[in-house]
């Protein structure tokens, strides 16, 4: 609730319209919901899919999952599951009956309905980096997250049309007290962006506050809010084989109000999961399905998705690795199983590198391409992630958006269309063996849209690049992010909605916010 | 023919054996011929494949190809093609009859038979960067190619087990006179490496000299040399629609002696090819098939491959771009058509970036993954390429080899196997909800081989990495390449073969080498 004067501007439509129309800093692609036309890469045959599925079912039936939430346990007991204290065992018939209740596809509509996303089918949307405790940039190096940096990342999240979702906190703003952090952060998220928001499942009050703030920012009645998905939460199991209290509590709160829950076990092979990738995937699926069965039991048909965060550790150091060959195969295998279960899928754009250098990009490209290959619908951490999720970097954010735009272009049918115009026989005859294609009408007609136009890649030859300072990519990305922040204008928000949001935040702060353990 | 004293060592078996066993600089993967288990990514349906094919056939029949080589024209006239001066028109029946003569797969056996490669089927091999006029490294910046740098790249080519072919010159050694350059370069290639070699088709004398040198280095009789593929050439058409004299001459010389020819049109969409990718691909295929029809007519069943070098230009500057979305789709479409024609396929690992930074890796990863997705068999420029092929960089070479090793690991069935041992149900039960997988026998049994182990990626956390100097990837790669060169030992070569090779080079130098235009 700082920067009050600047805040006023946001209520006006003009500034918002200008921001939506794009600024001159970069010439970026328009907003769209990408559709992935590729057949997924499927390392498993039908029998192998069954083997992974049956292993997940055996885990659920013979080992069971620790559900550290009495309400969840009570529901599952009523559903006929075998309960021993916190251990719950599920049989296949029940799990499959529950998972069949889940929709294969659904929308989430944020306060700006033009930013509605589709989760499922061949749709693929990208989420900003979420949850690093630290930031790093070329000027200031590595620092603890703070509120100013949080807001800068929100501006980048809004600015880039290829980022569809304002996910979790891009950095944890440790300069805001935890009791009111969610109030300040969501206020910024809901006013600096007009994209789909997320609630951390970290306590009943926080979850309820965030749902209320999303409702108020959208100017919605309670009935309108619950009528369709307006936001979502992502819960992580405590692998192996455990769901903790607040995650299950938040998930159930959202499910009861028709809001989507993404269940993403964090199964690092060799640490919290078997060292073999198929085993890690089976464990991850068992954990995800246990939560989904619970949610479908208490709220039949509620929107859910299965996330994968299966990677491997470095066996020398125990450090997590990302974008590895094993990570790619785990993501592809999870994609096959998630299609078998018939719900949307989440994966990530991740790396282990500490700075936005060459390694960061081969690891991130590996993870992003495996998301494409696995038919992933929701790509977390798609821009800005470094150091295995311990750092958010604005330079990396800008660089990743270049790759995301290339993926969006790669999906466009124009790149592989074979109409007569595309096959261009007449142009080939016209140019013949001695001409050049620059000059012909067939080229001139397509001059401005024929190819992907980059904003941070430098395609000039070495001499032209060197004469212009010889700037390496991270430095170019640094300049781009600074220029974006300078020109940034927040999207429009309805004046009454903004006032309601401000009143709510003030009231909840007066009440002391959410309880903390500190 | 410099460094004579060092040369002697190579004849001995001990140093060679040590080199083959690997050194301590990096812990790399053993030599292997990777097999790509993935189903290719296929943007075209069966009808679209036919449409591209039929367009290539129309180009060959109605427009024709300029064949700037009288011998080639005479052969094609005898074959029944319609000849008008240098313009040759081919009908579909003839082209398809000829292409059906080509083998779908073949081997190439260099002087060390353990380095034999397979081209075709699901096999995929990697070639060093070939033909840049310049080099760039962190210490010296951009420089014209020279012989010392040429030799350093040959050492890297030999050192890395993931590089299967010593292709063209990694840099053009401009300090060696063109009349004898091929003699010195091939001598170094054949003694610093024991991998498959390539001859540039740049004049009859050069081609014949290289074939003879490969024969001598292998200690082969003429009969043994022609009995199976021992080396190869790659020819580029002069797009649009033209094959020049020396390329056709070289191709025919190799084909007559049973040595493989890769035909790789260089079709930049918007410059030498239509601005639409399907049109550029159709033009490229027509050019490739015209040369293959010629070669199969004069040497039925000779080994050939179709290469793709279809990318797009930057429409603002005309500069070539690589690793773009359009490049990826062109490579995938070409893969579909090349499988339709039933011959092996070549693609590349390429980028437009000027230095080994983040951009260089997202572009190179895009091109390498499209090679995987297209079922490519021979990946040119797989390590070391920068600036659209105008620069070879040792740092980039080392970085690319990390990515190539990851692709090799990605191909391993272990990453997606679903045996009971992989599904690890017993380990999951043993660890239960409160344990850790590090300690269990299932993990310990797989400790050293479970995951890809990198040699230039740094997976330590930020603080450990910073305490160790905070070295970015290109600098780490620089140190690695210097260490490799320091420890490098050339592979063993038979003493008699070495002597014969030296005698041949001396004799040909005395004769003045090859004629030049200078």
Image (cartoon, coloured by chain):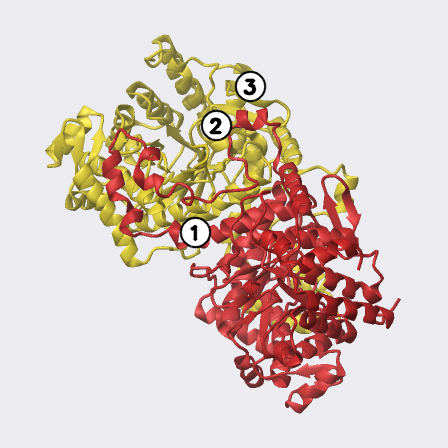
Chain colours: A yellow, B red
Task: Say if labels 2 and 3 share a chain.
Answer: yes
Identified at 37% across, 16% down, the residue is A504
First reached walking from the N terminus: tag 1 or tag 2: 1
* Chain label for disc 2: A
Identified at 49% across, 46% down, the residue is A366
| Residue A418 relative to residue B239: left or right | left
The percent position of residue A515, horizontal first and vertical second, equals 32, 13
Assess disc 3: are there few (<14), some (14-19) or many (≥20) residues with their C-alpha within 10 Å of its C-alpha. few
Residue A373 marker: 1
Q: In this figure, which residue is indicated by the disc labeled 3?
A: A6
| Residue A386 relative to residue A312: left or right | right
Which of the 4 quarters of the picture holds residue A43?
A: bottom left
Question: In the rendered view, would you say A269 is above or below B9?
Answer: above
Secondary structure under tag 1 reads helix
Q: Nearer the viewer, mark 3 or mark 1?
A: 1
The percent position of residue A5, horizontal first and vertical second, equals 55, 15
The percent position of residue A25, horizontal first and vertical second, equals 64, 35
Assess disc 1: are there few (<14), some (14-19) or many (≥20) residues with their C-alpha within 10 Å of its C-alpha. many
Q: Nearer the viewer, residue A42 or A429?
A: A42
| Residue A166 relative to residue A91: left or right | right
* Chain label for disc 1: A
* Chain label for disc 3: A
Q: Is residue A127 visible?
A: yes
Identified at 31% across, 52% down, the residue is B418
Q: Nearer the viewer, mark 2 or mark 3?
A: 2
The percent position of residue A181, horizontal first and vertical second, equals 42, 17
Residue A390 marker: 2
Identified at 69% across, 71% down, the residue is B216
Secondary structure under tag 3 reads helix
């Amino acid at each position: 609730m700082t920067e009050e004067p600047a805040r006023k501007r946001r209520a006006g439509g003009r500034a918002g319209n200008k921001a939506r129309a794009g600024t001159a800093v970069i010439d970026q692609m328009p907003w769209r919901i990408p559709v992935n036309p590729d057949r997924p890469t499927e390392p498993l045959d039908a029998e192998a899919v069954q083997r992974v599925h049956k292993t997940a079912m055996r885990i659920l039936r013979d080992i069971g999952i620790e559900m550290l939430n009495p309400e969840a346990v009570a529901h599952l007991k009523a559903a006929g599951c075998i309960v021993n204290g916190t251990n719950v065992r599920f049989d296949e018939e029940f799990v499959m009956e529950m998972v069949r209740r889940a929709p294969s596809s659904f929308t989430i509509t944020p306060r700006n309905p033009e930013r509605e996303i589709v989760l499922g089918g061949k749709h693929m949307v990208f989420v900003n980096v979420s949850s690093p405790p630290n930031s790093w940039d070329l000027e200031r190096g590595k620092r603890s997250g703070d509120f100013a940096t949080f807001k800068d990342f929100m501006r980048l999240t809004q600015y880039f049309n290829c980022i569809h979702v304002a996910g979790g906190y891009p950095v944890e703003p440790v300069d805001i007290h935890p009791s009111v952090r969610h109030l300040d952060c969501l206020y910024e998220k809901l006013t600096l962006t007009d994209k789909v928001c997320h609630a951390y499942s970290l306590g009943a009050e926080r979850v309820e506050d965030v749902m209320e703030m999303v409702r108020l920012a959208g100017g919605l009645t309670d009935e309108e809010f619950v009528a369709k998905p307006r936001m979502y939460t992502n819960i992580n199991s405590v692998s192996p084989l455990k769901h903790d209290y607040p995650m299950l509590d938040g998930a159930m709160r959202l499910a009861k109000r028709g809001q989507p829950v993404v269940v993403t076990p964090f199964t690092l092979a060799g640490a919290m999961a078997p060292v073999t990738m198929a085993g890690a995937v089976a464990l991850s699926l068992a954990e995800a399905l246990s939560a989904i069965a619970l949610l479908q039991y208490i709220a039949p048909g509620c929107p859910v998705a299965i996330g994968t965060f299966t990677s491997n550790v470095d066996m020398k150091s125990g450090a997590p690795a990302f974008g590895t060959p094993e990570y790619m195969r785990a993501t592809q295998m999870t994609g096959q199983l998630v299609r078998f279960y018939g719900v949307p899928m989440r994966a990530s754009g991740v790396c282990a590198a500490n700075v936005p250098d060459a390694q960061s990009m081969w690891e991130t490209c590996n993870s992003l391409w495996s998301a494409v290959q696995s038919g992933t619908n929701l790509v977390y951490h798609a821009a800005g992630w470094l150091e295995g999720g311990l750092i958010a970097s604005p330079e990396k954010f800008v660089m990743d958006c270049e790759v995301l735009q290339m993926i969006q272009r790669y999906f466009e049918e124009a790149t592989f269309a074979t109409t007569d115009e595309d096959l261009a026989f007449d142009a080939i005859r016209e140019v013949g063996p001695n001409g050049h294609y620059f000059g012909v009408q067939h080229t001139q007609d397509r001059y401005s849209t024929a190819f992907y136009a980059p904003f941070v890649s430098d395609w000039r030859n070495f001499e032209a690049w060197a004469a212009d300072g010889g700037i390496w990519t991270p430095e170019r990305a640094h300049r781009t992010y600074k220029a974006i922040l300078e020109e940034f204008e927040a999207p429009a928000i309805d004046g009454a909605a903004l006032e309601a949001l401000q009143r709510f935040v003030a009231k909840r702060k007066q009440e002391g916010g959410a309880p903390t353990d500190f």
